Image (spheres, rainbow, N blue to C red):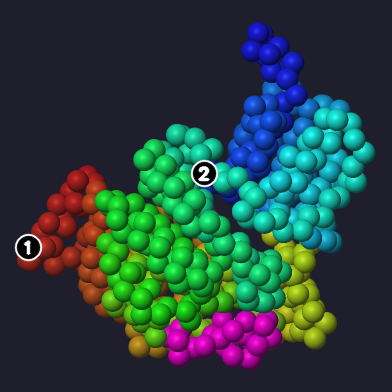
């Protein structure tokens, strides 16, 4: 009770959000905290994930008896935040609730946030502090505060406010710049026409402190990390001077890899560097529809270089249901990327974010979206509702069989020298008839599905399929071979005798 009484006597300001998973941290909350000035001693960061029960979240917030609660709202937590606000206001109606983040920065709001007291639209690094001061001083303030972009030189950096537990168990999010020069119509970053950079020397000092504390997982949230080559090389040099293991993740534009940058990337050891490359579409007509630059020759050249000359792990992104895109057009994109690289290809469904220009296509391309987060497209002039539902399942099964790496070689038996898209599309249709689900499918079950389809529907040789699948599965230490493959193994070779030992271990 003594601790509770102490908390209750303070003007406590709680900074909170619901991250999409436990391993994530919120850099935004730490920016707010870093810029709280004299109010910082009475402010506290309390993070949760969307998997936590909302009433339990409310309980853990209200135990601090806060006078102000600041909540970061994103596409993945908007519905949960609405419920959280409802509970907080029912239990503690005098507590002031301030919302900020992308999901409340642009209208129209498709989630009802009427119970919130204040909304900060735009970058709130300094605005949150000013609003808290006004609330505490009982100064009249408009409910919705629209912010212009602050100077990055005036913002205190957040990196010292990652806890030791964050460093040990979660990704550390960092940024060297804000904004994006491109105008891709589906992306909120396209609204920031100017790219603003943080002082690189100050950043390096902060990163050194993080490193000294044990941080080894750095995820840069810059949309165009490789736009400023000088800064990019400086940051890559920071990691190249360090002793592995470490993990650095960057989002890069696919057509801007000058030789100086390529030389640096080629120096990274395996497992140290991950590049997320937003392709989205390789169809010139569709790219033009969404105001996205498309330099295919450069993209092909750069991906080939990264694939063949570096140890960088790549994620290539494709989007389903862009205005005007058909299944055939999307399939051609996928076929091309698989031919270029064996890396992960992340397949996402188009979303309509408030504030973006993608809505200009609604009439011409008959774009119909859900008004419930994450605002997925439901149908278009070229894709029916059933097509999009099928492609959502396609994306999930693609993750399980292709991106997971569990079936790196055996999954290729699905298409061999034919179209990747057509053959995997047929496979995904068949899987769904067997599972009626895309979730909670065990690795054993996935093995059985792939084997049965290749042998049954594709009429492939049982022993060849079994051998290919075993080669994939046994690459991972500690795994046991699926028992159903045992009859198809040639026990005369030394390699297969070792595999048989794994069958025996299973009993």
| Numbered badge on residue 179 | none
Q: Residue at x 34, y 69 (%)?
A: 265
Instruction: Tell me where residue 367 appears, x and y as whole percent.
Output: 76, 77
| Direction from residue 358 to residue 257 in the image, left or right | left
Is residue 79 depicted above or below 492 in this figure? above
Residue 330 position by quadrant: bottom right
Q: Which residue is mark 1?
A: 494
Is residue 481 depicted above or below 31 in this figure? below
- Seen as rendered, the residue at the extreme right is 140
Q: Is residue 245 magenta?
A: no
Quadrant in which the C terminus appears: top left
Is residue 31 depicted above or below 255 in this figure? above
Q: Which residue is mark 2?
A: 159
Label 1 vs label 2: CA separation? 53 Å
Instruction: Residue 67: tell me if it is visible.
Output: yes
Q: Residue at x 63, y 76 (%)?
A: 182
Residue 92 position by quadrant: top right
Q: Nearer the viewer, residue 17 or 339?
A: 17
Q: Which residues are magenta?
A: 281-300
| Direction from residue 230 to residue 72 in the image, left or right | right
């Amino acid at each position: 009770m003594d601790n509770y009484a102490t908390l209750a006597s303070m003007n406590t300001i709680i900074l909170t959000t619901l991250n999409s998973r436990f391993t994530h941290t919120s850099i935004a909350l730490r920016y707010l905290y870093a810029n709280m000035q004299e109010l910082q001693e009475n402010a506290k960061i309390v993070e949760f994930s969307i998997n936590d029960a909302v009433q339990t979240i409310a309980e853990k917030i209200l135990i601090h008896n806060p006078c102000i609660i600041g909540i970061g709202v994103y596409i993945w937590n908007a519905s949960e935040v609405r419920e959280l606000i409802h509970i907080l206001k029912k239990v503690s109606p005098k507590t002031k609730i301030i919302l900020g983040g992308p999901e409340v920065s642009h209208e129209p709001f498709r989630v009802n946030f009427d119970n919130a007291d204040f909304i900060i639209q735009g970058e709130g690094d300094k605005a949150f502090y000013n609003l808290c001061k006004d609330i505490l001083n009982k100064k009249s303030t408009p409910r919705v505060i629209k912010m212009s972009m602050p100077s990055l030189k005036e913002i205190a950096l957040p990196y010292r406010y990652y806890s030791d537990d964050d460093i040990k168990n979660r990704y550390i999010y960092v940024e060297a710049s804000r904004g994006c020069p491109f105008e891709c119509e589906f992306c909120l970053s396209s609204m920031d026409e100017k790219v603003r950079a943080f002082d690189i020397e100050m950043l390096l000092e902060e990163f050194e402190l993080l490193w000294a504390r044990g941080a080894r997982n750095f995820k840069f949230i810059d949309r165009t990390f490789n736009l400023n080559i000088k800064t990019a090389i400086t940051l890559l040099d920071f990691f190249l001077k360090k002793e592995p293991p470490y993990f650095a993740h960057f989002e890069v534009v696919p057509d801007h890899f000058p030789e100086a940058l390529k030389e640096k990337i080629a120096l990274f050891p395996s497992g140290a560097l991950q590049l997320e490359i937003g392709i989205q579409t390789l169809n010139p007509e569709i790219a033009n529809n969404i105001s996205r630059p498309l330099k295919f020759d450069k993209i092909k050249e750069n991906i080939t270089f990264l694939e063949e000359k570096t140890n960088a792990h790549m994620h290539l992104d494709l989007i389903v249901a862009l205005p005007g895109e058909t299944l055939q057009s999307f399939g051609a994109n996928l076929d091309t990327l698989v031919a270029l690289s064996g890396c992960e290809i992340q397949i996402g469904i188009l979303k309509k974010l408030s504030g973006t220009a993608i809505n200009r296509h609604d009439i011409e391309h008959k774009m119909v979206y859900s008004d419930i987060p994450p605002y997925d497209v439901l149908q278009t002039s070229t894709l029916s509702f059933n097509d999009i539902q099928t492609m959502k399942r396609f994306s999930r099964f693609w993750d399980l069989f292709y991106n997971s790496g569990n079936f790196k070689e055996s999954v290729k038996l699905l298409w061999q020298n034919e179209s990747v898209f057509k053959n995997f599309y047929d496979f995904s249709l068949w899987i769904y008839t067997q599972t009626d689900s895309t979730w909670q499918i065990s690795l054993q079950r996935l093995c059985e599905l792939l084997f049965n389809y290749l042998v049954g529907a594709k009429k492939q040789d049982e022993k060849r399929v079994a051998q290919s699948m075993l080669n994939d599965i046994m690459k991972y230490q500690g795994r046991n071979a699926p028992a159903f493959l045992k009859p198809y193994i040639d026990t005369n070779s030394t390699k297969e005798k070792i595999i048989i030992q794994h069958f025996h271990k299973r009993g």
